[in-house]
Image: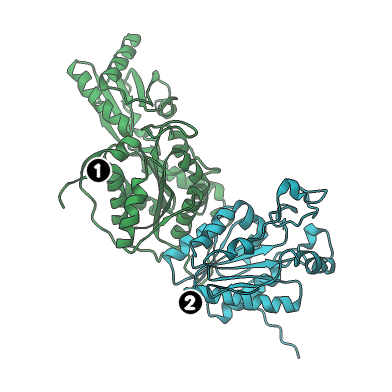
Amino acid sequence: MVEKRIPQLLVEDNKFCPGCGHGNINRVVAEVLEEMGLADTTVGSLAVGCACLMMDTFGVDWIQAPHGRAAAVGVGVKRVRPECCVFTYQGDGDSLAIGLSETLYAAIRNENITAIIVNNGIFGMTGGQMAPTTLSGQRTTTSPKGRDVSITGQPLNIVNQCRQLPIGYLARGSVASAKDINKLKKYIRAAFETQMSGGGYSLVEVLSPCPTNWKMSLEKSLEHIENDVKPIYPLGEFIKKGEKTDA
Amino acid sequence: MPLQLMKGNHALSEAAVRAGCRFFGGYPITPQSEIPEYLSARLPQSGGIFLQAESELAGINMVYGAAAAGFRAMTSSSGPGFSLLQEGISYIASAELPAVIVDVQRYGSGLGDISQAQSDYFQATKGGGHGDYKCIVFAPASVQESADLVVEAFDKAEEYRNPCIILSDASIAQMVEPVLLPEERGIDPDKAWAVRGKHGGEFKRVTSTMYYIEDFDAYIKNKYDTMAHNEQRWESVHTEDADVVLVAYGISSRICKEAVSEARAQGIRLGLIRPITLWPFPVNAFSGLEHVKAFMTVELSALPRLDEDVKLACEMRVPVRHFLGGVSIPDSSVITEAAIAILKEQR
């Protein structure tokens, strides 16, 4: 007999598109917060994008920040309520385009918060426009002939940006397979453990499919992550307990 | 407690801490920088947090977070930086959270200059950011009022759960005067609406309250109508028999007070309405003034701003003129002469 267990934090079914990776990531975060006993003391900071659909389905205290500013808002909460578990949950457009300054400065100050950044390579909510993370040559609604890096610059690798900073924890995971999801859960747990032990800033980037805007089936989307996305954005733990790893 | 000599920005900062402010996030810009400088030393002494933000955008959003967590929080800026705060102010108003924002006005659009001015009037009183909101705007005219009104601003922000603005300027902020500081107050951050984890209760969502309030149009209009009705503050000087009434706030109101005394000494019936709140504009100050032949705003800006609200307040029954001067502070005698010229026109 198979028992179906759903974290109590997921108070309603999620409202993401079919095949979207956010559902799996929500689930992993909910499981970790519950297992760590943090469900009652967590405050999440969302800004603008598909991630915001969580506000009605994921049962922790939330603040919705202006587009890109989730890190600054989260910092405001954490600094006055250091006993709370504070995390940001943002897409790549939100956190790395309009919000890159707030995202990076939270890391530069080694703020004791956890950032979860979902990289699906496009702006999802607005219909699949090019994001900072869009791969070279990738077609989007604002790069219809494929991203031309001679015009747009290279895709932004936030892990590389943060790797030189004195932060507590840095990892990149994926939801492209069950194996990836299990690893992701370890990363997310390590990130929250870093925060709750006062270990400083923790960031987990998550490679995630957007079948709707990629205009691919889920199977094709997962293949795309495996074959095209992971080589550009390799998985692993890059900083643990404030020390750089060999990854 | 005895009077002490303090700079406007310092008195405002000290009074903010005494009013229970425990968070400041902001960015350097002249002529407000004494506020973050003072608070960087003072807030940690009272268990508060000072954070120098990477930008005004980050500063106001840190304030948003700290305010959502139930703490009295503020930021301050000037001119160009005040423009950058508007996005966050709109969000704080939309989420119905208390916060205090100080704009120490400086001259000019764009980069402008660091000298005194009153050019940010529209931005402070008419919205500044996007959407349907208002902030109570307090305009101190002295160092004492800089201290008193920041306390009032924190109280009113919490009472209405709405951001309040202190619209100061380079003169008021930089001058040194005697001030009686307010008593130190305790703090009360664990409000029912504050995010701090759900602690076994329902989870809370701090976002635009429009998503959760029925008939939001009527609700929010009523909120701001109530504020407009209840929160008008002003000082009237010899308006009861005045032929010409000056209207001025902040630093220019002090020159106008001198002008009123000088004019009265010459037998000219000059009066003054000094708005202390700019929003709500003190329209009640204009009732019972049917004997007044003309109003004249005195504004330290290149373009008239205040004069639109005066025209509305007196319903254009009599002429409304403006006396402008941004780059240099006018002498009171020049204002008196301008008022006399208006009187001559009226005869």
Q: Which residue is mark 1?
A: B144
Give yes or no for contact between labels 2 and 1 (Cβ–Cβ under 8 Å): no
Which one is in front in this view, the residue at disc 2 or the one at disc 1? 2
* Residue at x 76% of width, y 91% of height: A1
Task: Answer above or below: position of A165 versus B223.
Answer: below
Q: Position of residue B209 (x, y in %)?
A: 54, 55
Evaluate whether residue B20 shows in this view.
no
Dot 2 and dot 1 within a common chain = no
Closer to the camera, B226 or B275? B275
Evaluate whether residue A55 shows in this view.
yes
Residue furthest to the front: A246
* Amino acid at circle 1: Gln
Task: Answer above or below: position of B132 versus B339.
Answer: below
Q: Position of residue B170 (x, y in %)?
A: 34, 36
Q: In terms of image quadrants, where is residue A221?
A: bottom right
Q: Is residue B240 left or right of residue B326?
A: left
Q: Position of residue B8 (x, y in %)?
A: 28, 42
Q: Quadrant of the C terminus of chain B?
A: top left
Q: Is residue B48 left or right of residue A181?
A: left
Q: Is residue B121 left or right of residue A228?
A: left
Q: Chain of mark 2?
A: A
Q: How many angstroms separate mark 2 from mark 1 (CA)?
A: 45 Å
Q: Which residue is mark 2?
A: A197
Q: Chain of mark 1?
A: B
Mark 1 Cα-neighbour bin, 10 Å: few <14, some 14–19, many ≥20: many
Q: In terms of image quadrants, where is residue B114?
A: top left
Mark 2 Cα-neighbour bin, 10 Å: few <14, some 14–19, many ≥20: few
Q: Is residue A15 left or right of residue B54?
A: right
Residue furthest to the bottom: A1
Q: Which SS class for mark 1?
A: helix
Q: Which chain is green?
A: B
